[in-house]
Amino acid sequence: MFLKITMDMNRGFLLPVLFCAVLVPPVYAAGDILPPCAQQYPVDDAARLKCYDQTAVPSSPVAAVSHGPERSYLTKAWNLDNLSNSDSSELDRLQPYRQNYLLVNRSSNPNRQPGSPLADHNVTAPADMDAAEIKFQLSFKADIGSQRNMDFLGIKTFRLWGAYTQQSYWQAFNVSYSSPFRETIYEPELIGTLGTGNASGLKLINLGWVHQSNGRSLPESRSWYRLYVLGGWEWNDMTSIMLRGWRRIQENPSRDDNPDIGDYLGRGDLVIRWEPRDKSQAIAMLLRNNLSRTGNRGYAQIDWATPLRLGSAARMHIQVSSGYGESLIDYNHRQNTIGLGFSFREW
């Protein structure tokens, strides 16, 4: 009799336990569901609580396992929440930096006779260049090292990046002139990212060193070095603004390919990017200016991309630009361009 009562009591106790064991694991078994909220919002208590509510109390148990909190563009691009590539191989640690694209580009005013204030940097005879050419850009960065869980003057994380961008202009349709590469720009960078931990507003400050060169011999040689500071702001996980100011590192005047480059390529730039949550399109606008009251010069570029129906790896891409500095050898040449083609992986 005692044994029967004990078994009945055990059965009454075990049934609720088993019921909870069946229901709870699908929601909480994935240990990486809740911690990202604390990592993504280390400072903003309200945003962190909202993240917990959205993640820990989902409408469907399956959804909780499959979908964590959505990471914003700047968060993903600069790994501000320390969630990506922590245990990746060296090759996997390569990430997109600027846009990667392949376009058929047409200029309203091709630069057939590039020049510079220095006499030996002036092309003496105009080249037979087509208005249409192929323009492509490859850009990536790699995580070199990081310092997490900081708390110094509002800075919560630090990350060091090595970056590289290559932009080429290929006269592919100029068969009579042997289809040359008109210009290739090589741009290595070293970037330190200071993360603020903010859910919105100012999210990062970048400190960078950058070199640009076209690797050409005289008279087409162009190059310069810069130090810059960049601030990155973001709102509603859809709109981001990156404002950058730079200072040129002066070179020996006898070796300076383009002493007046700052008068044309300016002292800073502004990038505004918008992408809806459904990822149906992305619009980015680049503005650059020399900030001079007299002899003001600038450059504007608008990029629009939308996914192709064939897959998610590529997007149809349209690029329109106007002003000085479409390429490095064109730094003091004004033109309008329009390009149509494809862009590839971007955050």
Image (cartoon, rainbow, N blue to C red):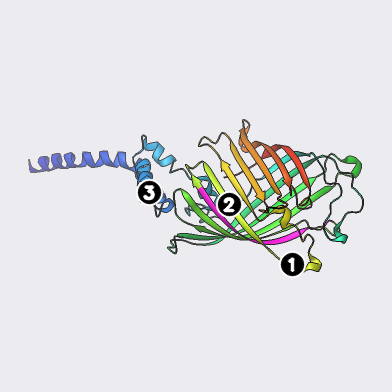
- Looking at the image, residue 326 sits to the left or right of residue 46; the answer is right
The amino acid type found where label 2 is placed reads: Leu
- In front: 26, or 254? 254
Name which of mark 3 and mark 2 comes first in the sequence: 3
- Looking at the image, residue 129 sits to the left or right of residue 231; the answer is right
**Residue 229 magenta-highlighted:** yes
Name which of mark 3 and mark 1 comes first in the sequence: 3
Classed neighbour count for the residue bearing mark 1: other residues with Cα under 10 Å, few (<14), some (14–19), many (≥20): few
Q: Which mark is residue 251?
A: 1
Q: How far apart are the alpha carbons under marks 1 and 2?
A: 26 Å
Q: Which residues are magenta?
A: 220-233
For the residue labelled by badge 3, is the local secondary structure a helix, a strand or a loop?
helix
Q: How far apart are the alpha carbons under marks 3 and 1?
A: 49 Å
Where is 160 relative to 66, above or below? below
Residue 180 image offset from top left, x and y in percent: 85, 47
Disc 3: which residue:
48
The residue under the point 75% across, 40% down is 336
Q: Quadrant of the N terminus?
A: top left
- In front: 20, or 294? 294
